[in-house]
Image (tube, rainbow, N blue to C red):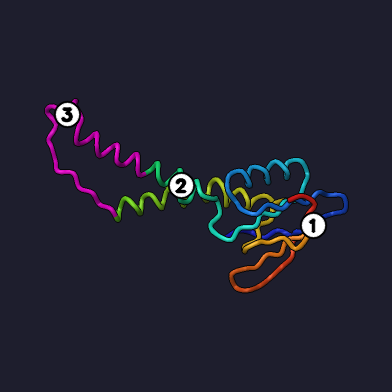
Amino acid sequence: KIVQHSIEKPAGQLHVAIIGTGGAAVAAALKAAENGARFTLIERGTIGGTCVNVGCVPSKIMIRAAHIAHLRRESPFDVGLSATPQLFLRDRLLAQQQARVDELRHAKYESILESNPSINLVRGSARFKDGQTLIVEAAEGDTREVAFDRC
């Protein structure tokens, strides 16, 4: 679970808000926090964005598994090795893939956000109220405003 840090900002401290929690958003949040800014990330779905959750990471896991299966079946260097029929256990492969995705999401996103008090995570869908305020609607129906200097 992500720790929600206070989004009250001391006078003179820059407050940045970004909608989404993909790699670029988290990198920007870390850099801004490193330079003294407060940062609010707003996410309506799963933390980490497309790459770690449904794009690059899961597809590369499947591509690698297919490559390993191909090598086992087509290797020119298997003389003297017993040929056992290849079993494709889809449920186990998908479970392994999801476990790796969950592990990477936690290591590269959730634990970093939890440990940085300058970065606040707000769950919900965001829309602009005006040039300095976002309205965030949570799935449960709660609404809150997030004021910012930069978005």
Q: Which residue is mark 3?
A: 78
Residue density around tag 1, few if under 14, some if 14–19, many if 20 or more, within 10 Å: few
Nearest to N terminus: mark 1 or mark 2: 2
Q: Which residues are magenta?
A: 62-90
Which residue type does callout 1 highlight?
Gln
Residue 45 or 72: which is nearer the viewer? Answer: 45
Residue sitting at the far right: 11
Q: N-terminal of the two: label 2 or label 3?
A: 2
> Please, what secondary structure does the residue beneath circle 1 have?
loop
Q: Does residue 109 appear in this view? A: yes
Mark 3 neighbour class, 10 Å CA radius: few under 14, some 14 to 19, many 20 or more? few
Secondary structure of the residue carrying numbered label 2: loop
Quarter of the picture containing the N terminus is: bottom right
Side of 74 where 30 appears, left or right: right
Residue 26: x %, y % from top left: 63, 46
Residues at badges 1 and 2 in contact (C-beta under 8 Å)?
A: no
Q: Check residue 44 for magenta coloring.
A: no
Q: Image point 31% across, 41% down: which residue?
A: 65
Q: CA distance from mark 1 to mark 3?
A: 65 Å
Kindly identify the amino acid type of the residue bearing the numbered disc 3.
Asp
| First along the sequence among labels 1 and 3 | 3
- What residue is rendered at 62% in x and 68% in y? 138
Q: Which residue is mark 1?
A: 132
Few, some or many residues within 10 Å of mark 2 (<14, 14–19, 20+): few
Could you say where residue 49 lies in the image, as x and y percent from the top left?
54, 50
